[in-house]
Image (tube, grey):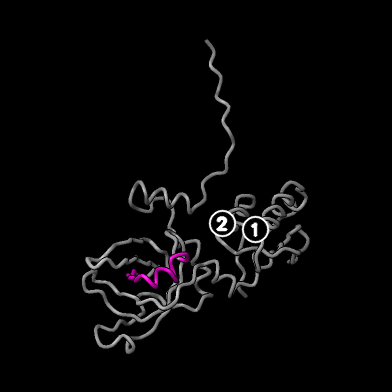
Amino acid sequence: QEFKDPDYQFTKPFSDKELLQGEVEYLGLYLTIDPLSRYLDEIDHLQVSKIATLVPSYGGYASERPTGTVAGILIELRRSVTSKGDHLMSGVIMDNTGRMVFTLWRDQIARFEDKLELNTLVMVTGKIGFDERENMKKIFIDKVENITTARQRAAKAIRVYLDAKQLKDDGLAARIREVAETQGGNTRLELAIDNDVSFLIAPTQYYVEPSDSVLDSLEYYVKNRVEVVYD
């Protein structure tokens, strides 16, 4: 008896973020991808400090503690309830120099929860202290900014690089246009065109949301040829 191959349905491969979430969920660690690697070039443009360079206060009043801003991957996020019934959210942020912890109380959870997503880059500003129990620096958060809002504030454009062959691909152009038309935002989409004779940067009519999901959608069609431009 002859067996035919099943009719598999085509689906997009997992994004880096989806792979990371799966690895952490099932293995408890990052195996194939360093979650910080995709953001390293961008962090240099965001005017933040490295965790290792922050000098914590070990006591005194909160108002006397030094203030700092860091950008890092949110690698842990936990919820808990105290014996008095107060809701807490705690987590760990990691950059390429170290880790630090934070705790949010109920009013802070309401303000910041929607900006905190595991395995993505967040920027946090607050007073710098030290957590004796965790033996780690701690930030008392006053402000949270996710990578999308940081890009909206600081980035000049999202740039897609096309070579001469890609430039002639009507199907590719239609797919890029579809992403741009369905993911509107306030950051201009640019095309960088290299036709073997000249190099041209051409602003398009489209403005997109500079989120990881939009960049991942563009990367699916032009792998490793999408850039967030700051200068």
Residue at the extreme front of the image, as rendered: 85
Contact (CB < 8 A) between labels 2 and 1? yes
Residue at the extreme bottom of the image, as rendered: 64
Q: Position of residue 34 (x, y in %)?
A: 43, 58
Q: Is residue 117 left or right of residue 189?
A: left
Residue at the image point whose x is 60% and y is 53% from the top: 217
In magenta, the rendered stretch is 99-115
Query: Could you say whether the residue bearing mark 1 is in a helix, strand or loop?
Result: loop
Residue 47 part of the magenta segment: no
> How many labels, in total?
2
Crowding near the residue tagged with mark 2, few <14, some 14–19, many ≥20 C-alpha atoms within 10 Å: some
Depth check: 124 or 28 in front? 124
Q: Position of residue 223 (x, y in %)?
A: 60, 52
Rounded to the nearest whole Å, what is the CA distance between mark 2 and mark 1? 9 Å
Q: Position of residue 62 (x, y in %)?
A: 31, 85
Q: Is residue 198 left or right of residue 31?
A: right
Relative vertical location of residue 64 with respect to residue 181 in this rendering, above or below: below
Depth check: 198 or 190 in front? 190
Q: Quadrant of the C terminus?
A: bottom right
* Label 2 or label 1, whichever comes before in sequence order: 1
Q: Which residue is mark 1?
A: 183
Residue at the image point whose x is 44% and y is 54% from the top: 33
Q: Nearer the viewer, mark 2 or mark 1?
A: 1
Numbered tag placed on residue 213 in the rendering = 2
Residue at the image point whose x is 35% and y is 86% from the top: 66
Residue 113 part of the magenta segment: yes
Q: Is residue 38 left or right of residue 187?
A: left
At label 2, which amino acid type do we have?
Answer: Ser
